[in-house]
Amino acid sequence: MSSRTLPDFLWSVRRAMPWLGAFVMSVAAAQGGVQVPVVPAQVKSVGTGFELDGVVQPVKQSTISAQASGRIATLLVKAGDKVRAGQVLATIDDREAQTGVQSSQAQVAQAQAGLHNAQANFDRTRDLRAKGFVSAAALDTAEAQLKGALAGRDQAGAGARQSALAQGFTRVTAPFEGWVLQTHAEAGDLAVPGKPLLTLYAPLPMRVVVQVPVSRSGAARAAGAVELLLQDGVGAGQWQRPVSISTVPTADPVSQTIEWRLELSAEAAKTLLPGQQVRVRFAGGQADRMLVPSTAVLRRGELTAVYVVSGTGFVLKAVRLGADHGAEGVEVVAGLTAGDRVALEPVKAGLAGAQAVAPSAVTK
Protein backbone atom coordinates (compact mmCIF):
# COMPACT_ATOMS: atom_id res chain seq x y z
CA MET A 1 0.00 0.00 0.00
CA SER A 2 1.39 3.39 -0.98
CA SER A 3 1.07 5.89 1.85
CA ARG A 4 1.09 8.72 -0.65
CA THR A 5 -2.47 7.90 -1.68
CA LEU A 6 -3.84 8.51 1.82
CA PRO A 7 -5.81 11.75 2.34
CA ASP A 8 -4.07 14.43 4.35
CA PHE A 9 -6.37 14.07 7.31
CA LEU A 10 -5.41 10.41 7.76
CA TRP A 11 -1.79 11.40 8.14
CA SER A 12 -2.69 14.08 10.67
CA VAL A 13 -4.64 11.48 12.65
CA ARG A 14 -1.72 9.07 12.45
CA ARG A 15 0.73 11.64 13.76
CA ALA A 16 -1.58 12.81 16.59
CA MET A 17 -2.85 9.38 17.67
CA PRO A 18 -0.57 6.55 16.47
CA TRP A 19 -2.81 3.75 17.69
CA LEU A 20 -5.92 5.21 16.04
CA GLY A 21 -3.98 6.02 12.88
CA ALA A 22 -2.83 2.39 12.61
CA PHE A 23 -6.42 1.24 13.03
CA VAL A 24 -7.68 3.58 10.30
CA MET A 25 -4.93 2.47 7.92
CA SER A 26 -5.71 -1.17 8.54
CA VAL A 27 -9.38 -0.55 7.81
CA ALA A 28 -8.41 1.29 4.63
CA ALA A 29 -6.29 -1.67 3.56
CA ALA A 30 -9.14 -4.07 4.27
CA GLN A 31 -11.44 -2.02 2.09
CA GLY A 32 -9.46 -2.58 -1.09
CA GLY A 33 -11.68 -2.16 -4.10
CA VAL A 34 -13.86 0.59 -2.63
CA GLN A 35 -16.02 2.10 -5.37
CA VAL A 36 -15.85 5.84 -5.95
CA PRO A 37 -18.34 7.56 -8.28
CA VAL A 38 -16.76 9.83 -10.90
CA VAL A 39 -18.07 12.40 -13.35
CA PRO A 40 -16.30 14.17 -16.21
CA ALA A 41 -15.36 17.82 -15.95
CA GLN A 42 -17.64 19.61 -18.40
CA VAL A 43 -17.60 22.94 -20.17
CA LYS A 44 -20.98 24.64 -19.74
CA SER A 45 -22.47 27.99 -20.58
CA VAL A 46 -23.04 29.92 -17.35
CA GLY A 47 -23.75 33.48 -16.33
CA THR A 48 -20.70 35.69 -15.87
CA GLY A 49 -22.29 37.93 -13.21
CA PHE A 50 -21.42 38.00 -9.53
CA GLU A 51 -22.98 38.94 -6.21
CA LEU A 52 -21.79 41.14 -3.35
CA ASP A 53 -23.18 42.32 -0.01
CA GLY A 54 -24.37 45.92 0.24
CA VAL A 55 -25.45 48.02 3.20
CA VAL A 56 -28.58 50.18 3.42
CA GLN A 57 -27.87 53.85 4.15
CA PRO A 58 -30.15 56.89 4.44
CA VAL A 59 -29.47 59.50 1.78
CA LYS A 60 -30.16 62.32 4.25
CA GLN A 61 -28.18 61.78 7.46
CA SER A 62 -26.70 64.46 9.68
CA THR A 63 -24.46 64.49 12.74
CA ILE A 64 -25.68 67.33 14.97
CA SER A 65 -22.81 69.07 16.75
CA ALA A 66 -22.62 71.74 19.43
CA GLN A 67 -22.06 75.35 18.32
CA ALA A 68 -21.64 76.79 21.83
CA SER A 69 -19.53 75.96 24.86
CA GLY A 70 -20.99 74.89 28.19
CA ARG A 71 -22.49 72.00 30.11
CA ILE A 72 -25.29 70.06 28.42
CA ALA A 73 -28.28 70.94 30.57
CA THR A 74 -30.82 68.57 28.99
CA LEU A 75 -30.82 65.92 26.28
CA LEU A 76 -34.46 65.66 25.27
CA VAL A 77 -34.32 62.71 22.84
CA LYS A 78 -32.89 59.20 22.67
CA ALA A 79 -32.05 56.73 19.92
CA GLY A 80 -35.18 55.67 18.05
CA ASP A 81 -37.19 58.84 18.74
CA LYS A 82 -38.98 60.56 15.88
CA VAL A 83 -38.39 64.32 15.68
CA ARG A 84 -39.82 67.14 13.59
CA ALA A 85 -37.96 69.96 11.91
CA GLY A 86 -37.09 72.72 14.39
CA GLN A 87 -37.73 70.57 17.48
CA VAL A 88 -35.39 71.24 20.41
CA LEU A 89 -33.14 68.23 20.88
CA ALA A 90 -30.80 69.45 23.64
CA THR A 91 -30.06 72.59 25.65
CA ILE A 92 -26.70 73.91 26.81
CA ASP A 93 -26.21 75.99 29.97
CA ASP A 94 -26.73 79.57 28.68
CA ARG A 95 -25.89 81.67 31.74
CA GLU A 96 -22.71 82.92 30.12
CA ALA A 97 -24.58 83.66 26.91
CA GLN A 98 -27.25 85.59 28.84
CA THR A 99 -24.55 87.72 30.43
CA GLY A 100 -23.18 88.49 26.99
CA VAL A 101 -26.66 89.50 25.76
CA GLN A 102 -27.16 91.84 28.73
CA SER A 103 -23.71 93.39 28.20
CA SER A 104 -24.47 93.95 24.51
CA GLN A 105 -27.81 95.54 25.31
CA ALA A 106 -26.08 97.94 27.72
CA GLN A 107 -23.55 98.85 25.02
CA VAL A 108 -26.41 99.54 22.59
CA ALA A 109 -28.07 101.87 25.13
CA GLN A 110 -24.78 103.65 25.73
CA ALA A 111 -24.20 104.06 21.99
CA GLN A 112 -27.72 105.41 21.54
CA ALA A 113 -27.13 108.00 24.25
CA GLY A 114 -23.81 109.03 22.71
CA LEU A 115 -25.46 109.32 19.31
CA HIS A 116 -28.25 111.49 20.74
CA ASN A 117 -25.69 113.78 22.35
CA ALA A 118 -23.58 113.98 19.16
CA GLN A 119 -26.65 114.74 17.06
CA ALA A 120 -27.72 117.56 19.39
CA ASN A 121 -24.18 119.03 19.42
CA PHE A 122 -24.01 118.91 15.61
CA ASP A 123 -27.38 120.64 15.24
CA ARG A 124 -26.39 123.34 17.70
CA THR A 125 -23.00 123.91 16.05
CA ARG A 126 -24.58 124.09 12.61
CA ASP A 127 -27.00 126.83 13.80
CA LEU A 128 -24.17 128.79 15.39
CA ARG A 129 -22.09 128.47 12.25
CA ALA A 130 -24.96 129.82 10.19
CA LYS A 131 -25.01 132.92 12.42
CA GLY A 132 -21.22 133.23 12.27
CA PHE A 133 -20.58 132.58 15.98
CA VAL A 134 -18.32 129.48 15.43
CA SER A 135 -15.69 128.56 12.90
CA ALA A 136 -16.00 126.00 10.12
CA ALA A 137 -13.52 123.81 11.98
CA ALA A 138 -15.90 123.55 14.93
CA LEU A 139 -18.67 122.40 12.58
CA ASP A 140 -16.37 119.81 11.03
CA THR A 141 -15.48 118.52 14.50
CA ALA A 142 -19.14 118.20 15.46
CA GLU A 143 -19.90 116.36 12.20
CA ALA A 144 -17.02 113.93 12.78
CA GLN A 145 -18.29 113.26 16.31
CA LEU A 146 -21.74 112.56 14.90
CA LYS A 147 -20.37 110.07 12.36
CA GLY A 148 -18.34 108.36 15.11
CA ALA A 149 -21.46 108.08 17.26
CA LEU A 150 -23.39 106.54 14.34
CA ALA A 151 -20.63 103.99 13.79
CA GLY A 152 -20.57 103.23 17.52
CA ARG A 153 -24.32 102.64 17.45
CA ASP A 154 -24.02 100.26 14.48
CA GLN A 155 -21.16 98.40 16.15
CA ALA A 156 -23.11 97.99 19.38
CA GLY A 157 -26.11 96.73 17.42
CA ALA A 158 -23.99 94.13 15.63
CA GLY A 159 -22.57 92.98 18.96
CA ALA A 160 -26.09 92.62 20.34
CA ARG A 161 -27.17 90.50 17.37
CA GLN A 162 -24.07 88.34 17.71
CA SER A 163 -24.76 87.78 21.42
CA ALA A 164 -28.37 86.85 20.67
CA LEU A 165 -27.19 84.42 17.99
CA ALA A 166 -24.70 82.85 20.41
CA GLN A 167 -27.47 82.41 22.96
CA GLY A 168 -29.60 80.72 20.28
CA PHE A 169 -26.84 78.16 19.74
CA THR A 170 -27.47 76.89 23.28
CA ARG A 171 -30.72 75.37 21.98
CA VAL A 172 -29.89 72.53 19.58
CA THR A 173 -32.72 71.94 17.11
CA ALA A 174 -33.45 69.36 14.41
CA PRO A 175 -32.62 70.52 10.87
CA PHE A 176 -35.20 68.20 9.29
CA GLU A 177 -37.88 65.67 10.18
CA GLY A 178 -36.56 62.19 10.84
CA TRP A 179 -35.39 59.70 13.44
CA VAL A 180 -32.62 59.77 16.02
CA LEU A 181 -30.11 57.15 14.95
CA GLN A 182 -27.63 57.53 17.82
CA THR A 183 -26.74 59.86 20.68
CA HIS A 184 -23.10 60.74 21.35
CA ALA A 185 -23.39 62.68 24.64
CA GLU A 186 -25.35 62.76 27.88
CA ALA A 187 -26.73 65.50 30.10
CA GLY A 188 -23.90 66.95 32.18
CA ASP A 189 -21.21 66.42 29.54
CA LEU A 190 -19.16 69.40 28.47
CA ALA A 191 -20.14 70.70 25.04
CA VAL A 192 -17.66 72.51 22.83
CA PRO A 193 -18.11 73.76 19.25
CA GLY A 194 -17.85 70.82 16.86
CA LYS A 195 -18.49 68.08 19.44
CA PRO A 196 -21.09 65.58 18.07
CA LEU A 197 -24.24 65.35 20.16
CA LEU A 198 -26.46 63.00 18.12
CA THR A 199 -27.10 61.64 14.64
CA LEU A 200 -30.36 62.06 12.73
CA TYR A 201 -31.55 60.44 9.54
CA ALA A 202 -34.56 60.85 7.31
CA PRO A 203 -36.44 57.57 6.60
CA LEU A 204 -36.71 58.45 2.91
CA PRO A 205 -34.99 58.30 0.53
CA MET A 206 -32.74 55.27 1.08
CA ARG A 207 -29.88 53.79 -0.89
CA VAL A 208 -27.72 50.66 -0.90
CA VAL A 209 -23.96 51.14 -0.81
CA VAL A 210 -21.81 48.30 -2.10
CA GLN A 211 -18.00 48.16 -2.21
CA VAL A 212 -16.93 46.66 -5.55
CA PRO A 213 -13.33 45.36 -5.76
CA VAL A 214 -11.25 47.23 -8.30
CA SER A 215 -10.45 43.90 -9.97
CA ARG A 216 -14.16 43.47 -10.71
CA SER A 217 -15.01 47.05 -11.59
CA GLY A 218 -14.82 46.32 -15.31
CA ALA A 219 -17.24 43.41 -15.03
CA ALA A 220 -19.54 45.51 -12.84
CA ARG A 221 -19.67 48.34 -15.40
CA ALA A 222 -20.30 45.83 -18.20
CA ALA A 223 -23.12 44.12 -16.30
CA GLY A 224 -26.39 43.98 -18.17
CA ALA A 225 -28.35 44.73 -15.00
CA VAL A 226 -27.80 45.50 -11.33
CA GLU A 227 -30.38 44.01 -8.99
CA LEU A 228 -31.05 44.02 -5.25
CA LEU A 229 -32.45 41.15 -3.19
CA LEU A 230 -34.92 42.83 -0.81
CA GLN A 231 -36.34 40.85 2.08
CA ASP A 232 -40.09 41.14 2.65
CA GLY A 233 -39.88 40.64 6.43
CA VAL A 234 -40.89 36.96 6.33
CA GLY A 235 -37.60 35.59 5.06
CA ALA A 236 -38.24 35.35 1.33
CA GLY A 237 -37.28 38.15 -0.98
CA GLN A 238 -37.41 39.36 -4.53
CA TRP A 239 -34.89 40.91 -6.88
CA GLN A 240 -35.52 44.54 -7.78
CA ARG A 241 -33.65 47.15 -9.76
CA PRO A 242 -32.54 50.44 -8.19
CA VAL A 243 -34.00 53.76 -9.30
CA SER A 244 -30.57 55.16 -10.18
CA ILE A 245 -26.90 54.16 -9.93
CA SER A 246 -23.85 56.29 -9.22
CA THR A 247 -20.24 55.57 -8.32
CA VAL A 248 -17.59 57.40 -6.34
CA PRO A 249 -14.83 58.42 -8.80
CA THR A 250 -12.02 57.27 -6.49
CA ALA A 251 -10.89 53.92 -5.08
CA ASP A 252 -10.24 53.29 -1.41
CA PRO A 253 -6.43 53.05 -1.03
CA VAL A 254 -6.65 50.41 1.72
CA SER A 255 -9.45 48.06 0.63
CA GLN A 256 -8.97 48.73 -3.11
CA THR A 257 -12.71 49.00 -3.66
CA ILE A 258 -14.97 51.45 -5.48
CA GLU A 259 -18.19 52.59 -3.80
CA TRP A 260 -21.39 52.08 -5.76
CA ARG A 261 -24.55 53.88 -4.61
CA LEU A 262 -27.87 52.34 -5.62
CA GLU A 263 -30.90 54.57 -4.97
CA LEU A 264 -34.06 52.78 -3.85
CA SER A 265 -37.66 53.59 -4.62
CA ALA A 266 -39.86 54.81 -1.78
CA GLU A 267 -41.88 51.60 -1.89
CA ALA A 268 -38.79 49.38 -1.67
CA ALA A 269 -37.25 51.44 1.16
CA LYS A 270 -40.26 51.13 3.46
CA THR A 271 -39.25 47.69 4.75
CA LEU A 272 -35.52 48.43 5.12
CA LEU A 273 -33.50 49.82 8.01
CA PRO A 274 -30.17 51.68 8.01
CA GLY A 275 -27.29 49.23 8.41
CA GLN A 276 -29.24 46.28 7.02
CA GLN A 277 -27.37 44.03 4.59
CA VAL A 278 -28.75 43.54 1.09
CA ARG A 279 -27.53 41.17 -1.60
CA VAL A 280 -26.49 42.94 -4.81
CA ARG A 281 -26.29 41.05 -8.10
CA PHE A 282 -24.35 42.27 -11.13
CA ALA A 283 -25.95 40.24 -13.91
CA GLY A 284 -23.73 39.59 -16.92
CA GLY A 285 -23.97 37.62 -20.13
CA GLN A 286 -23.22 33.95 -20.82
CA ALA A 287 -19.78 32.39 -21.16
CA ASP A 288 -18.33 28.89 -21.40
CA ARG A 289 -16.67 27.72 -18.19
CA MET A 290 -15.31 24.36 -17.00
CA LEU A 291 -17.34 23.12 -14.04
CA VAL A 292 -17.07 20.31 -11.53
CA PRO A 293 -19.45 19.45 -8.66
CA SER A 294 -18.57 21.27 -5.45
CA THR A 295 -18.49 17.91 -3.60
CA ALA A 296 -15.51 16.85 -5.76
CA VAL A 297 -13.29 19.61 -4.40
CA LEU A 298 -10.90 18.70 -1.58
CA ARG A 299 -9.94 21.70 0.56
CA ARG A 300 -6.96 21.62 2.92
CA GLY A 301 -6.21 25.11 4.20
CA GLU A 302 -5.38 27.21 1.15
CA LEU A 303 -5.00 24.14 -1.08
CA THR A 304 -7.86 23.16 -3.41
CA ALA A 305 -7.56 19.91 -5.34
CA VAL A 306 -9.55 17.11 -6.95
CA TYR A 307 -8.88 13.39 -7.45
CA VAL A 308 -8.68 12.56 -11.16
CA VAL A 309 -8.90 9.07 -12.66
CA SER A 310 -5.46 7.91 -13.78
CA GLY A 311 -5.07 4.37 -15.07
CA THR A 312 -6.70 2.05 -12.55
CA GLY A 313 -6.60 4.51 -9.67
CA PHE A 314 -6.69 8.19 -8.82
CA VAL A 315 -4.17 11.00 -8.77
CA LEU A 316 -4.53 14.21 -6.77
CA LYS A 317 -4.38 17.41 -8.84
CA ALA A 318 -4.26 20.93 -7.46
CA VAL A 319 -6.78 23.25 -9.11
CA ARG A 320 -7.56 26.96 -9.03
CA LEU A 321 -11.22 27.68 -8.55
CA GLY A 322 -13.37 30.49 -9.85
CA ALA A 323 -16.97 31.44 -9.14
CA ASP A 324 -19.41 29.05 -7.49
CA HIS A 325 -22.46 28.58 -9.72
CA GLY A 326 -24.51 26.67 -7.17
CA ALA A 327 -26.21 23.58 -8.54
CA GLU A 328 -24.32 23.97 -11.81
CA GLY A 329 -21.03 23.40 -10.02
CA VAL A 330 -17.89 25.31 -9.19
CA GLU A 331 -15.73 26.89 -11.87
CA VAL A 332 -12.21 25.47 -12.41
CA VAL A 333 -9.89 28.12 -13.80
CA ALA A 334 -6.74 25.98 -14.02
CA GLY A 335 -5.59 22.43 -13.30
CA LEU A 336 -8.02 20.34 -15.38
CA THR A 337 -8.76 19.65 -19.01
CA ALA A 338 -12.13 18.90 -20.54
CA GLY A 339 -13.02 15.24 -20.15
CA ASP A 340 -11.01 14.61 -16.98
CA ARG A 341 -13.01 12.36 -14.68
CA VAL A 342 -13.08 13.59 -11.09
CA ALA A 343 -14.09 11.71 -7.95
CA LEU A 344 -17.30 12.85 -6.28
CA GLU A 345 -16.05 11.49 -2.93
CA PRO A 346 -12.43 12.67 -2.64
CA VAL A 347 -11.90 11.10 0.80
CA LYS A 348 -12.68 7.61 -0.52
CA ALA A 349 -10.65 8.28 -3.65
CA GLY A 350 -7.57 8.68 -1.46
CA LEU A 351 -7.84 5.14 -0.09
CA ALA A 352 -5.67 2.39 -1.51
CA GLY A 353 -7.36 0.31 -4.16
CA ALA A 354 -10.15 2.79 -4.84
CA GLN A 355 -11.92 2.10 -8.15
CA ALA A 356 -13.69 4.60 -10.39
CA VAL A 357 -17.26 3.78 -11.35
CA ALA A 358 -20.20 5.69 -12.78
CA PRO A 359 -22.46 7.27 -10.11
CA SER A 360 -25.30 4.85 -10.92
CA ALA A 361 -23.02 1.82 -10.48
CA VAL A 362 -22.11 2.53 -6.82
CA THR A 363 -23.35 -0.23 -4.49
CA LYS A 364 -24.80 0.82 -1.16
Image: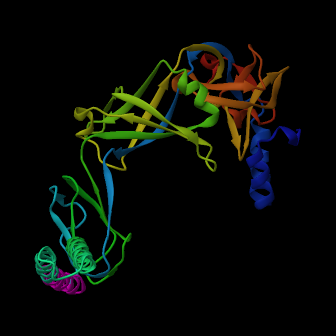
Which residue is nearer to you in this view: 146 or 267?
146
In the picture as drawn, the residue positioned furthest to the front comes out as 132
Above or below, 11 against 49 in this view is below
At horizontal 69% and vertical 25% (from top left) the residue drawn is 332
Left or right: 292 with respect to 77?
A: right
User: Which residues lie in the magenta part?
Assistant: 95-116
Closest to the observer, 40 or 146: 146
**Along the horizontal axis of the image, is 67 left or right of 286?**
left
Front residue (pair 205, 277): 205
Determine whether 347 is above or below 325 in the image: below
Relative side of 356 to 97, left or right:
right
Count of marks placed on residues: 0
| Identity of the residue drawn at 30% across and 39% down | 235
Tell me the chief SS of the magenta region.
helix
Q: Residue 347 appears at what percent x and percent y?
A: 70, 37
Quadrant for residue 308, please give it: top right
Magenta stretch contains residue 148: no
Is residue 113 in the magenta section?
A: yes
